[in-house]
Amino acid sequence: MKVHKYGVLLAALAMVATGCRAGDDGGGSEAVDAPGVTDDACPDAVNEDNGCIYLGTISDLTQGPFAPLGVPITEAQKAFWNRVNEDGGIGGYDIDTDKFVKDNLYNPQTHKQVYSEIKDDVLALAQSLGSPTTLAIVGDLERDEMIAAPASWTSLWPFEDTILESGAPYCAEAMNIVDYMVENKSIKSVMSVGFPGDFGGDGAAGAKIAADSNSLKYTNVETAPGQEAQAGAISAVVKNKPDLVILGTGPTETAVIVGQAAAQGYQGQFVGLGPAWNPALLGTPSAKALEALYLASGYWGSFGTDTPGHEAMREAVGEVEQENDGYTAGWAWSYPLKAALEEWLDGDYDKTRAGLLEAVGSLETVDYEGMLPEEAGNRAGDPNETIFRQTVLSKVDPKEPAGLALEEDFFSGPTAEGYEFDGPCFEG
C-alpha cells in the first residue's frame, strides 16, 4: 500500500513539473503530456481556473514583402483565440497566442532559426507565414510532430501531415483564373509573373496546366521581391502584350507592375493571386490602373462579406486603421486548429503532440461559420479527394471594405475539377 501511494505521489509531482492537466482535458482522466500545455493559467487569463495552451506564431511583421498582410493576420488570430477564451476555452484550457510571436522577415533561414527558439514552448503553430519559409521547417515539424497552420496556399501542403491548411492551393486558383477568363473574355495568351519558389512557382504551374488545357500561348516570368526589381517584368508584359497576366507577387510589386505597364500602354487583364492585393494600393499612383485592369483572386469572400464568420471577425477585431484581408485570412485560418484541439481534447487520443496529429487526420469537416464550406476542412482522405478547388474573384472598388467587391463567388473551372493531384504542382 505504501508503494502504491508513493507511486501516485510521484505521478502527481511529475504532472506538476511538466505542466500536465488531468481530468479537465475533455477526453477522460488522461493527463496532457505535451510541450506548450500547462496547468497554470495563461498570462492575463480570461478564465483563471483554466490551464493554458500556448500556440506559436512566425510571421512577416516588419520588413518583408508581406508585412502589410502579416501584421493584420497576426492581430486577427489573437482576436480569434481571445473569442474562444471568452466562450470558456477548449477542454479546460485557454489559448495563448501572445507570448511566442516571432518575425521571419520572409526569410527561410530566419524562419528556421526562430522556430528553433520556440518549438519546445508551444503545442502547435497558429501561424507559419510564407511558402518557402514554412517549407524550410517542414522536416522539423515532422520530427517534432508539430502541427502548423500555414499563412500560404501552396499545393504542397495537402501532402504534408503536419500542415493544417485552408482554402484552395495557388495551383488550383490559377487554373480557375485561366478558365474563368477563357469563358468570359475569350483570351488567347497567358503570362505568369511571380516570385521564384513555392508561391509564384505553384501559381505559375497551375496557370500553365490550364493554358495548355485551353490551347493558349503561355509565358512565365520570374521576378524578385522589391519595387526596384520589377523593370524586367514590366518590360515583358508591355512587349508580349498577353491577354491575361497572373501575378504571384506581393502588394508593392503588384502596384508597380500594373501601374507602370498601364502607363506604357498595356491594356490587358491582370489577376492577382490572393497575397498580391492590399487596399493600401488604392492610395498609390497605380490606383486608377488597378481599378481599370485588375481583379483579385481569393480563397473566401473579402472583409465585408456577409457570413457569420466574417461578422464575428469584424466584431472581434473592432475598429482598425484600414480594413484589410489579412484580418480575414488570419481569422479563417484559425478554424481548423480550433476544430483539431476540440477533437483532440474531447476524443480518445493520446494527449501528446502525436495524438493531436492523429486528431487532425480524423477531421472530415470544419465549421468555418460560412467563410468556407464545411467540406473544405476535410483531412481524412487522399489529397486528390480532399483538396478544396474553389476560389472567388473580386473587382477593385474603393467604396468597399478592403477595396474589393465580389465578382464571382465560389467556383471551380473544368481544369481544376479534372486535374489529378497526385503530388504538388510545383516542386522547387
Image (spheres, grey):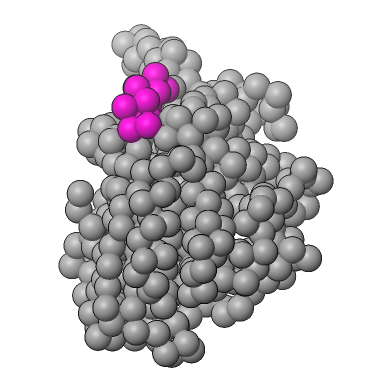
Query: Which residue occupies the foreground of this view, 253 or 71?
Result: 253
| Residue 374 relative to residue 153: left or right | right
Percent position of residue 428, x then y: 20, 49
Would you place residue 376 above or below residue 33 in this image?
below
At x 42%, y 48%, the residue is: 230
**Residue 279 within the segment the image draws in magenta:** no
At x 71%, y 68%, the residue is: 397
Percent position of residue 148, x then y: 40, 42
| Residue 420 visible within the image | yes
At x 29%, y 48%, the residue is: 197
Quadrant in which the N terminus appears: top left
Q: Residue furthest right?
A: 319
Would you place residue 423 above or below residue 63 in this image?
below
Query: Which residue occupies the foreground of this view, 114 or 110?
Result: 110
Magenta span of residues: 107-119
Would you place residue 243 above or below residue 283 in this image?
below
Count the numbered circles shown.
0
Percent position of residue 410, x then y: 52, 77
